[in-house]
Image (cartoon, rainbow, N blue to C red):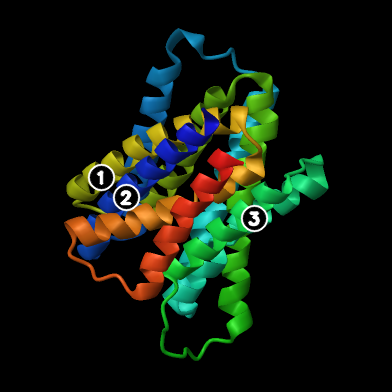
Amino acid sequence: MWILSTFLASALFAASSMFNKIAMGEDTPTDKLLPGTFLAGFLVLLVKQGRAISVPSWPLVLSGLAMSLLSMLNCVAILLAIRSGPMGKVAAVAGSHSLVTPLLALFIFGERLNFWQWVAVGIATLGMILVQYKKEEKTETATWVWFGLAFLGALGSSGETLVLDKATVLQGDGISGLVWSYLFSFVFTSLWFLRRRQRRFTRPFYLGAADGAVSALGMIFFAHALAGGPAGLVAALSTSAVAMRAIGGRLFFSERLSLSSWIGIALSVCAFALVSFF
């Protein structure tokens, strides 16, 4: 069941990126999108919990704050990396969280995967890299700058996954932790938005809200997957969202996919099949 939840989460994450793509096509600044993204996500998660939401407690509040900060670290670090390095290579390094997460889970929490699960992690990671890796022109910025920023983004993503898995899901209340995470993120991004004093934000706000609502639904399935499966393996399989995003770009935006992208998509499918059969 957790494998199906991971697949559904990946599909929803890929769908949410379609709204981001529309916004980026209109040269919309990211900080115009984020308040709507986190507000819509917060409302979706709040409705999902309803009366079942837990009374505020320090573990939930602090885990929500930690997830929020790690999530924003991921976003900011990757944006800075893209500004100074080749986008395809930055995306590949940032996506290394699919490998970083199971390694951190092993060394920090002693979470062990069997041989076939590690093979699936490797296949999923390779598939993700092939889908989004593209040859780019050389940049003047030193490689270690954008590489370090991209890897910092990967660590932020991995940290968010592990906090969600251990600090909230083990309490049987993963969604409540996410509610707090989205609330903190909404407050932080709104303060940044107001500081910039931006105007005419109606359309970007709606695009961000659509992105947030769909991605929050994905986080619900992701939390359910973490409750049933190993955090490292769930994180690795969730990178299939990259493959689904590529397919969405081909279907809805007439993007062309290279041979390596199609191979990467096939590897993503193989990773799910491998886990399902072994």
When asked about the image quadrant of residue 172, the answer is top right
Q: How far apart are labels 3 and 2 at the CA level?
A: 37 Å
Q: Earlier in the sequence, mark 3 or mark 1?
A: 3
Does residue 257 appear to the left or right of 4 in the view shown?
A: left
Q: Position of residue 73 (x, y in %)?
A: 57, 55
Q: Residue furthest top?
A: 51
Residue identifier under label 1 = 205
Residue 119, labelled with which disc?
3
Does residue 227 appear to the left or right of 87 in the view shown?
A: right
Q: Are marks 1 and 2 in contact (CB under 8 Å)?
A: yes
Q: Which callout, 3 or 2, points to the residue nearer the camera? A: 3
State whether residue 21 appears in this view.
no
Q: Are marks 3 and 2 in contact (CB under 8 Å)?
A: no
Q: How far apart are labels 1 and 2 at the CA level?
A: 6 Å
Q: Badge 3, how many Cα within 10 Å: few under 14, some, many 20+?
A: some
The residue at 51%/27% (across/down) is 1
Q: Earlier in the sequence, mark 3 or mark 2?
A: 2
Mark 1: which amino acid? Phe
State whether residue 95 appears in this view.
yes
Q: Badge 2, how many Cα within 10 Å: few under 14, some, many 20+?
A: many
Q: Earlier in the sequence, mark 1 or mark 2?
A: 2
Q: Are marks 3 and 1 in contact (CB under 8 Å)?
A: no
Residue identifier under label 2 = 33
Q: Position of residue 26 (x, y in %)?
A: 20, 63
Does residue 117 appear to the left or right of 243 in the view shown?
A: right
Q: Residue furthest front?
A: 277
**141 or 216: which is nearer to us?**
216
The residue at 40%/73% (across/down) is 260
Tag 1's secondary structure? helix
Mark 2: which amino acid? Leu
Q: How far apart are labels 3 and 1 at the CA level?
A: 41 Å
Tag 3's secondary structure? helix
